[in-house]
Image (cartoon, grey):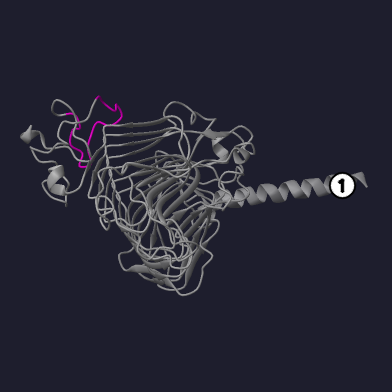
Amino acid sequence: MRLIFATSIAIACCLALACVAGAEEKLAGRATGAAPRQVKIGNGSGALHYPDAQKALDLRPGDTVYIAAGTYSGFSLGNLAGSAAAPITVTCDPQAVFTTETPQPNEFPNIAHVRFESFRYENYKSTVMHITGASHDLLFKNFHITNATGYSFHIYDAAKVFNGTRESTFYNFKWENVDFDRKTNGAAISSSDYAPVSNLKSVLLDFEITRCTFKNFDNAALAFPVIGLDKCFNLQVHECTFSDIGMAASPIGHNVCICGSGYFKVYNNKFTRQWANDVRNWPMKLNALGYGGADAVNRFYNNISWEKRKYPMYEHNVVPQADLDKSSGYFSRTSSEICFNTLYRSRKAADSKSPYCGQLVDVYSPGVTIRHNLIVAPEADAPFDPRQNYVYHLGSGPQPDLVVENNLVFETPAQAGLVDTVEFVPSQSSPARDAATGRVEYITKDHYNHDRYQGAAADVGAVESPDTEK
């Protein structure tokens, strides 16, 4: 009996060694340190499905996956990792396009240090990418997504529960120059599980969305945000444009451009013609990994919003204590700072089922600072009332730690001294010119990246007068 057992072990060992030898022989053609290579996939049609891409395509850091010209219905890619120094690039032929009338299983588990570039989705009735597992350090660049439904980028994994480590989060995701046009019934970028605070699933760290365009969203049945990221700490949204964001019919007609819980830095963006808040935030910080310090606050600055309907630019909500109590001490409340923004012609929500308000900020909980903002022609569908508070609205009554300083309100652009209502630059005689008091140290540039402190003081609003006029 012992002889048979020993013989079995010997045979098993030999088989294992043979497998390893076979694997080494298979990779023998790619010596360590070999130059990166391009791997071409796709035959022009169907769905591309690579659940174990690293192994199936023999990919190494620095390699490029090239999707051939053609019309494809879907794309799945999993278990793929480059390195910080040599990410793997996945890119498309200019004549490659993805289109489908039916949902596709576009799963992306366990991908790290990968760059996705130059993708085109047209008439796409499905999630573009559902990202799960140990995924981090991802770039999505030069995407064009037209006439899509559902969640485009969905970063969510119910099995990924935060335990205090970076490895239990999704981290370092970036979207750059991604264009969304005619999006319906679903967020463009989302992690929502509809229990945003009361669990520790799918925590997000250091997400960035820059130079992206979001236009013609019409979530007619339900209110989906354009960007909806929950338990997201240090989200940066900058130099983006949001326009023509439609109103949902239920329950009272509303929508939102950037929504979620955590702390966000939203700056140098344009918002126009939207039935929505520009930002609706449930302010939290993460008491772990360095995300609970002095910088763990919401900052909304240098943004321009015009011809918006119904809702204020920024909404500071209350995180229920009962939800915080379920977070094992990881989550606690934080504050919001709203500085140097320009709001022009907020409009009445004529078809809404609830009263509108056109103020700059809606305050529902403590810890809000509002400074150096410029408001012109507020609530333009109603007569201007100089006694009305157009700066902030107390949606839940008076709140402690509310600081409101040096915000300017004018009935017309002429009274505000604006050169025009296209770029919103203060003229030489504008009362907004050099009218800011003190400095906000983290704001050194204006909406157009001009120096913020050029003259005796900064200008109020998102735009600084050129130094040639000072």
> In this orientation, does residue 440 appear?
yes
Instruction: Please determine whether, in this image, residue 3 is positioned above or below residue 440.
Output: below
Q: Residues within 10 Å of mark 1 (few under 14, many from 20)?
A: few
Task: Answer with left or right where residue 270 lies relative to residue 334.
Answer: left
Q: Main secondary structure of the magenta part?
A: loop
Instruction: Please determine whether, in this image, residue 454 is positioned above or below residue 191.
Output: above
Instruction: Please determine whether, in this image, residue 174 is positioned above or below residue 142.
Output: above
Q: Mark 1 = which residue?
A: 5
For the image shown, how many numbered marks are present on the structure?
A: 1
Q: Position of residue 239 (x, y in %)?
A: 28, 46
Part of the protein shown in magenta: 438-453
Q: Nearer the viewer, residue 54 or 94?
A: 94
Q: Residue at x 36, y 41 (%)?
A: 392
Q: Is residue 451 inside the magenta stretch?
A: yes
Residue 144 occupies quadrant? bottom left
Secondary structure type for disc 1:
helix
Query: In the displayed image of the protein, which residue is found farthest to the left?
Result: 468
Residue 181 occupies quadrant? bottom left
> In this orientation, does residue 418 appear?
no
Q: Nearer the viewer, residue 90 or 327?
A: 327
Query: In the displayed image of the protein, which residue is found farthest to the right?
Result: 1
Q: Nearer the viewer, residue 5 or 309?
A: 309
Q: Amino acid at mark 1?
A: Phe
Q: Position of residue 254 (x, y in %)?
A: 43, 59
Q: Is residue 42 inside the magenta stretch?
A: no
Q: Position of residue 83 (x, y in %)?
A: 44, 41
Q: Position of residue 103 (x, y in %)?
A: 51, 70
Question: Where, quadrant-wise, is the C terminus in this rendering?
Answer: top left
Task: Answer with left or right where residue 422 lies relative to residue 14.
Answer: left
